[in-house]
Image (spheres, rainbow, N blue to C red):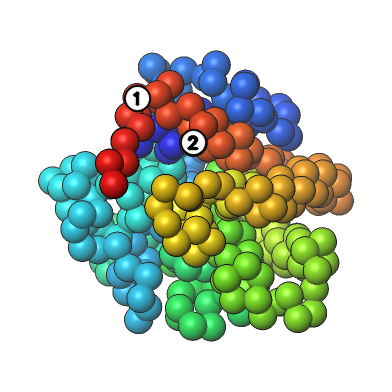
């Protein structure tokens, strides 16, 4: 997946360099030809939505499932694992590139091995978000509950490796957070529940406060190295264009929703270094996914994608 690979290059630059932000231009200079001689991080922990859910929703009563074809057609053995992808997701590629392990299992997977637990899991759930209203209909696992799952994980980890080593793994682990899109789509654009009490700026601040509280809670639990992904071009999501434009040939990206995503990302990029200054020993990084994805949408040929013609 070209999208996943570009995000990995971006994330690797962020976590390997002593900076707090990374642009898509810098990301394009990263190389995936070699992996570090030894893992820089002992484990990887992942929180968020479908962009980073490797299968937790398989074990939840929700409509948001990807454990059936055509999902997984490019995954090893062509198995639909619950990833909303034809193959691996960003956490899998990143864990592999950093030498941690080949892929990141979901925390809810039964019978996880001790090695899988030692090297990290994902707590993410497709359909999730920072706003508790986001999961009220989908029954996905909200980000707030993912923290409770993480607490359960910590107890299991310390039961395996001991308290001191467990604390060290948590403190040195790479934490990936990717959420927010569902909040805007489900609560503001398509189902305007939050529009009854917030304008777009107010809702952005509401979500950023939820995110800040979430990061502080992870910090209190021992996490120190965290990457937070910004929003993609929401107005270019197929579902958003389809809702707006019923005739396929009329479909185009929704500029207002893209503009909202960009302004949210700017606020997020500003928040993280400010929060890092308040949390001693923390390293908080912003991952720009908007620009790489927007570039792929506008110039697909550069990423090996053909533009289909519509003969209607």
Q: Residue 219: percent from the left, percent from the top?
A: 70, 57
- Which quadrant of the view contains residue 121? bottom left
Residue ID for mark 2: 297
- Name the quarter where the N terminus is drawn: top left
Which residue is painted at 60% across and 51% down in the image?
254
Q: Is residue 237 left or right of residue 222?
A: left
Which residue is painted at 22% across and 44% down in the image?
75
- Which quadrant of the view contains residue 221? bottom right
Q: Residue 203: percent from the left, percent from the top?
A: 76, 67
Which residue is painted at 42% across and 38% down in the image?
4
Q: Residue 22: percent from the left, percent from the top?
A: 67, 30
Q: CB of mark 2 within 8 Å of CB of mark 1?
A: no
Q: Residues within 10 Å of mark 1 (few under 14, many from 20)?
A: few
Q: Is residue 196 left or right of residue 292?
A: right
Report helix, strand or loop for mark 2: helix
Does residue 297 appear anywhere in the picture? yes
Residue ID for mark 1: 304
Indicate which disc, 2 or 1, sits on the residue closer to the N terminus: 2
Q: Is residue 62 above or below residue 229?
A: below
Q: Residue 245: percent from the left, percent from the top?
A: 50, 58
Q: Residues within 10 Å of mark 2 (few under 14, many from 20)?
A: some
Which residue is painted at 35% across and 81% down in the image?
61
Between 114 and 21, the residue placed more toward the observer is: 21
């Amino acid at each position: 997946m070209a999208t996943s690979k570009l995000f990995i290059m971006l994330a690797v630059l962020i976590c390997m360099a002593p900076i707090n932000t990374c642009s898509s231009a810098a990301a394009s200079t990263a190389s995936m030809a070699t992996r570090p001689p030894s893992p820089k991080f002992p484990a990887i922990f992942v929180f968020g939505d479908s962009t980073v859910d490797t299968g937790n929703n398989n074990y939840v009563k929700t409509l948001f499932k990807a454990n059936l074809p055509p999902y997984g057609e490019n995954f090893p053995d062509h198995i639909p694992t619950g990833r909303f992808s034809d193959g691996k997701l960003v956490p899998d590629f990143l864990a592999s590139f950093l030498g941690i392990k080949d892929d990141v299992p979901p925390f809810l997977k039964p019978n996880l091995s001790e090695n899988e637990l030692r090297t990290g899991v994902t707590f993410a759930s497709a359909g999730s978000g920072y706003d508790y209203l986001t999961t009220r209909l989908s029954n996905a696992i909200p980000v707030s509950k993912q923290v409770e799952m993480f607490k359960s994980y910590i107890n299991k980890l310390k039961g395996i490796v001991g308290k001191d080593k467990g604390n060290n793994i948590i403190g040195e682990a790479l934490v990936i957070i990717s959420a927010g899109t569902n909040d805007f789509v489900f609560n503001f654009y398509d189902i305007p529940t939050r529009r009854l009490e917030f304008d777009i700026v107010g809702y952005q601040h509401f979500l950023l406060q939820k995110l800040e509280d979430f990061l502080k809670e992870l910090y209190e639990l021992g996490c120190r190295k965290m990457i937070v992904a910004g929003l993609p071009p929401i107005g270019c999501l197929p579902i958003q264009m389809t809702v707006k434009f019923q005739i396929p040939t009329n479909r185009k990206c929704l500029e207002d929703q893209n503009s909202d995503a960009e302004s949210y990302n700017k606020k997020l990029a500003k928040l993280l270094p400010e929060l890092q200054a308040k949390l001693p020993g923390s390293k908080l990084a912003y991952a720009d996914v908007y620009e790489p994805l927007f570039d792929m949408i506008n110039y697909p040929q550069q990423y090996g994608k053909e533009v289909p013609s519509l003969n209607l």
